[in-house]
């Protein structure tokens, strides 16, 4: 942390904060929990939802997020490193504690343990002792909750591992007595952990205390028999024999014969044809075998959606690394998402593993805790690979984890296993679908280069239809390979023309049928999450915002977030960006089938109505920020259950519109074709201005054509008046002048019949702009004067100001520059009073233009800079380009050719980004 303030976070005992060497009270218990939840991931962003889960777990209420914000605000003040900055920083999606890992005792402990592994015995002993000295009692002492308890157990195992290595190092150095005190304390805390007792017995024996060593052996032997019904394992028996061989003849307790060692080899056959995943294989190597590993059991999880190839990757990699584990490998399919719903309980998995480890069935404890303890004891002295395939969640996995170092646990799951990553430190590899190149490689591997090359673009079409899922691609390849009459092109056509691609990708059994595989994930969902999954298939476009998802499902945002988290954990949904949700095309097709089966037509119609209201009201809110001067058409109130996005800035509104643009256009089209004509014209007119401002000219025409056709179906005079006017603007922008005039005439007639003065005035201003482009400046002046009179009758101050500026601009075009100055300056004053920054900027551009032509170039430049400053707050790129073109003329007149060129080039870049027709004219002027 780049600051003079020194902070230290202690969690290996009570949670403490030290600032510049003094203890600072971190607040009440839950606030301490928040601090601990952040310090665990020091330097990394912790999502807010993860913080809530760590502090409250399953007991979190709707108010937990608000309470969390209170704690975070207090902690930001507490962790202030300067008057205007804090070590606790908000970043996209969560919070990050910007401190070095060495400032957190648990990270310092782990670093010391890792470094010790590569050191000679004397230095190793010192580093391990320094690591163990950081412990001040029970980790996270005083904190309650599920997460704190899981973390406490995991860290305790790391402490035990380090203590055993420290004791072994002292045995190597001939100073075993130095380890006795700590080992005795740990054995008292963990009386059934055989490796720990074995280390204490060895240390007692090496310290010249054989009687005490044998007494310790008898104590654990009796306790194992009484509590677990077991004899001591191989390691304990070996240590006991070693003590007896050097002890006095009167020593008690005959040696116990060691059990025969069983070396299980349970890994199933590796996939015969494994394609791509080179990056993932390297990542697994890095996760499982980091440099100077701390010595704790490695936990690696491969997580991803159904059909993405988790098991294939796990088995392929498992066979590659199995020789690193001389004591064998264990495998079990936990059936977490099996079609039958018959999930393997942890107790049954332990039984399978114990039999594989050579424990006679009659000696397997019936009690769950005893069975788990025996399993951990047997693995304690071994190096084994344990593969837990198809796990349901973290809770199913935890009892199957070794309790000490040496082994590797490889897990696959459709669940994200966030709890396992947080508490047990599991490394998680999210497995994604194949990209186009890898999808082609898989098809080439199955079908051969010649056939794939002959397929042309069909290969990429099939890959896209399969959503990049390896299972779907494999089924597609098998269909082509198994049929002499089917080519890649015919399969691509079938996938494209079929009502659902799921029919074309039906497998041969439950293990290869896409629907059946998706169903396994779907059936594990809670009722609200399952309904959300179904309803999202009705949403147009590729992704949606949280508010859009809340609207189509009718859920309030707090309940929606819980359902979204559940779907993301199940890999049935993913975030395309913070706050935007999507699912793969095949899953969407499956969800659409479900919504047709499960929901009634009335329920589906109501969901679509909520979605349309969400789009209409959110689009209106966006346009209010982007174009506050527009003629607003007030929509009717939204249906119950609709959530509307709100925007803090113009940039947020534009970002939402661009993200939702495809869905908005699809909404207008589906409404126009499906008979929802009111929504078609309302949404079409609401988004029209945004489409032009952002340069989507043809889309502007297309959407307003549909809106106008829907208005005609309604025979609604208000709708027809507005759509005629906005469609006239569309044609005018594309220089289809006659079509524009026709629509404007119709708009004027209809606004007049409605008595709508503002509508008439705005249409006259639109006509003025059109005839100005035709160089009919007197005609433009006449229409702007009519608009001014209409706005005065309507008592619309902002409209009057904009009409005045139009008149000023007309005078400037006619060469009457003093008249232009009077009208445009008056307009700028009025627009400033109404808070219309965009209109005020345009007026200052007109004033500058008049000054330029009167020879007052410096005054003109001052006006243009004022206009640019105002436009910077509005995001109006087109008018910025116009002002820069005018500014370049004044700069050139003063001899600043470099400044003139720079501004003209900047204007061209803007016009090109907007795809504006004027770009060609500016490009030509630059070429000259």
Image (cartoon, grey):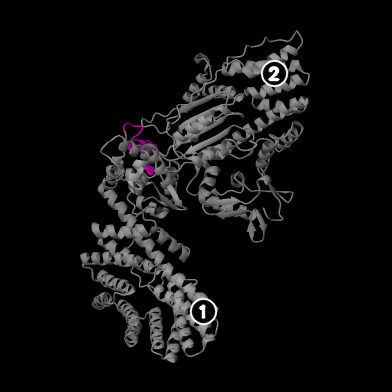
Inspect this view and state whether residue 662 appears: yes
* On screen, residue 305 above or below 803: above
Is label 2 in a helix, a strand or a loop?
helix
Mark 1 or mark 2, which has the lower sequence index?
2
Question: Which residue is at 77% across, 18% downward?
Answer: 209
Return the mark for residue 216.
2
- Residue 5 horizontal side relative to residue 464, left or right: right
Q: Identify the element where label 1 is drawn.
A: helix
What residue occupies the far top of the structure in this picture? 249
Count the marks: how many?
A: 2
Q: Residue at x 56, y 53 (%)?
A: 70
Query: What numbered label is drawn on residue 900?
Result: 1
Q: Which residues are magenta?
A: 508-531
- The one nearer the camera, 867 or 55, is 867
Q: Is residue 120 left or right of residue 535?
A: right
Q: Nearer the viewer, residue 921 or 608?
A: 921
Q: Position of residue 72 (x, y in %)?
A: 58, 52
């Amino acid at each position: 942390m780049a600051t003079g303030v020194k902070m230290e976070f202690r969690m290996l005992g009570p949670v403490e904060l030290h600032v510049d060497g003094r203890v600072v009270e971190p607040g009440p218990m839950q606030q301490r929990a928040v601090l601990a939840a952040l310090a665990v991931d020091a330097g990394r962003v912790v999502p807010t939802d993860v913080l809530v889960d760590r502090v409250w777990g399953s007991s979190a209420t709707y108010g937990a997020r608000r309470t969390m914000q209170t704690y975070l605000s207090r902690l930001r003040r507490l962790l202030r490193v300067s008057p205007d900055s804090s070590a606790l920083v908000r970043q996209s999606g969560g919070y990050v504690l910007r401190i070095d890992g060495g400032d957190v005792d648990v990270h310092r402990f782990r670093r010391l343990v890792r470094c010790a592994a590569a050191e000679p015995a004397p230095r190793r002993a010192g580093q391990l002792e320094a690591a163990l000295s950081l412990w001040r009692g029970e980790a996270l002492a005083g904190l309650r909750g599920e997460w704190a308890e899981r973390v406490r157990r995991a860290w305790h195992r790391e402490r035990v591992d380090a203590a055993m290595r420290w004791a072994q190092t002292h045995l190597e150095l001939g100073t075993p007595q130095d380890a006795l005190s700590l080992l005795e304390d740990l054995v008292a805390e963990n009386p059934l952990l055989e490796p720990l007792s074995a280390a204490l017995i060895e240390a007692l024996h090496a310290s010249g205390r054989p009687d005490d060593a044998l007494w310790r052996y008898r104590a654990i032997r009796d306790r194992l028999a009484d509590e677990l019904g077991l004899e001591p394992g191989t390691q304990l028996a070996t240590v006991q024999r070693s003590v007896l061989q050097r002890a006095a003849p009167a020593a008690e307790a005959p040696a116990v014969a060691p059990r025969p060692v069983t070396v299980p080899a349970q890994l199933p056959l590796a996939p015969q044809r494994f394609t791509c995943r080179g990056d993932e294989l390297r990542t697994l190597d890095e996760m499982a075998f980091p440099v100077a590993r701390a010595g704790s059991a490695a936990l690696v999880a491969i997580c991803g959606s159904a059909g993405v190839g988790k098991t294939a990757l796990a088995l392929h990699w498992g066979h590659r690394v199995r020789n690193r584990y001389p004591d064998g490998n264990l495998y079990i399919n936990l059936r977490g998402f099996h079609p039958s719903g018959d999930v393997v309980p942890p107790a049954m998995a332990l039984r399978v593993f114990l039999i594989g480890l050579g424990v006679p069935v009659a000696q397997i404890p019936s009690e769950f805790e005893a069975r788990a303890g025996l399993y951990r004891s047997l693995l304690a002295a071994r190096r084994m690979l344990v593969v837990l395939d198809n796990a349901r969640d973290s809770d199913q996995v935890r009892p199957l984890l070794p309790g000490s170092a040496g082994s590797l646990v490889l897990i696959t799951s459709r669940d994200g296993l966030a709890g396992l990553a947080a508490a047990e430190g599991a490394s998680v590899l999210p497995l994604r679908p194949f990209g186009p190149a890898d999808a082609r490689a898989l098809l080439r591997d199955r079908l051969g280069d010649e056939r794939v090359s002959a397929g042309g673009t069909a290969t990429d079409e099939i890959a896209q239809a399969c959503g990049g899922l390896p299972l779907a691609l494999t089924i597609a390849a098998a269909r082509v390979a198994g049929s002499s009459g089917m080519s890649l092109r015919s399969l691509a056509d079938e996938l494209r023309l079929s009502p659902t691609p799921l029919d074309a990708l039906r497998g041969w059994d439950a293990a290869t049928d896409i629907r059946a595989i998706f169903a396994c994930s779907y059936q594990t969902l809670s009722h609200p999450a399952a309904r959300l999954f179904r309803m999202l298939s009705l949403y147009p476009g590729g992704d949606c915002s949280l508010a859009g998802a809340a609207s189509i499902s009718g859920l309030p945002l707090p309940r929606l977030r819980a359902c979204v988290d559940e779907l993301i954990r199940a890999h049935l949904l993913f975030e395309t960006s913070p706050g935007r949700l999507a699912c793969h095309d095949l899953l969407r097709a499956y969800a659409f089938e479900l919504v047709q089966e499960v929901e009634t037509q009335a329920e589906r119609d109501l969901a679509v109505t909520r979605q349309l209201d969400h789009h209409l009201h959110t689009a209106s809110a966006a346009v209010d920020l982007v174009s506050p001067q527009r003629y607003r058409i007030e929509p009717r109130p939204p249906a119950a259950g609709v959530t509307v996005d709100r925007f803090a800035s113009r940039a947020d509104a534009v970002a939402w519109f661009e993200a939702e643009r495809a869905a908005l256009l699809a909404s207008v089209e589906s409404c126009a074709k499906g008979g929802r004509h009111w929504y078609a014209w309302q949404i079409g007119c609401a988004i029209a201005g945004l489409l032009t401002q952002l340069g989507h000219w043809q889309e502007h025409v297309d959407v307003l054509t549909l809106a106008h056709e829907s208005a005609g179906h309604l025979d609604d005079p208000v709708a027809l008046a507005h759509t005629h006017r906005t469609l006239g603007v569309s044609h005018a922008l594309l220089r289809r002048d006659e079509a524009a005039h026709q629509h404007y005439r119709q708009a004027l007639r209809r606004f007049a019949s409605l008595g709508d003065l503002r509508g008439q005035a705005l249409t006259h201003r639109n006509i003025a702009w059109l005839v100005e482009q035709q160089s009919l400046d007197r005609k433009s002046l006449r229409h702007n004067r009519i608009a001014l009179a209409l706005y005065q009758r309507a008592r619309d101050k902002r409209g009057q100001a904009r009409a005045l500026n139009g008149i000023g601009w007309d005078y400037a075009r006619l060469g009457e520059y003093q008249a232009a100055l009077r009208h445009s300056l008056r307009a700028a004053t009025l627009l400033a009073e109404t808070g219309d920054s965009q209109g005020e900027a345009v007026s200052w551009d007109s004033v500058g233009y008049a000054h330029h032509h009167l020879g007052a170039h410096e005054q003109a430049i001052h006006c243009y800079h004022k206009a640019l400053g105002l436009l910077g707050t509005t995001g109006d790129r087109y008018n910025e380009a116009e002002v820069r073109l005018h500014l370049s003329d004044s700069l050139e007149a003063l001899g600043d050719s470099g400044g003139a060129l720079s501004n003209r080039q900047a204007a061209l870049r803007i016009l090109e980004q907007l795809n504006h027709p004027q770009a060609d004219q500016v490009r030509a002027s630059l070429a000259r």
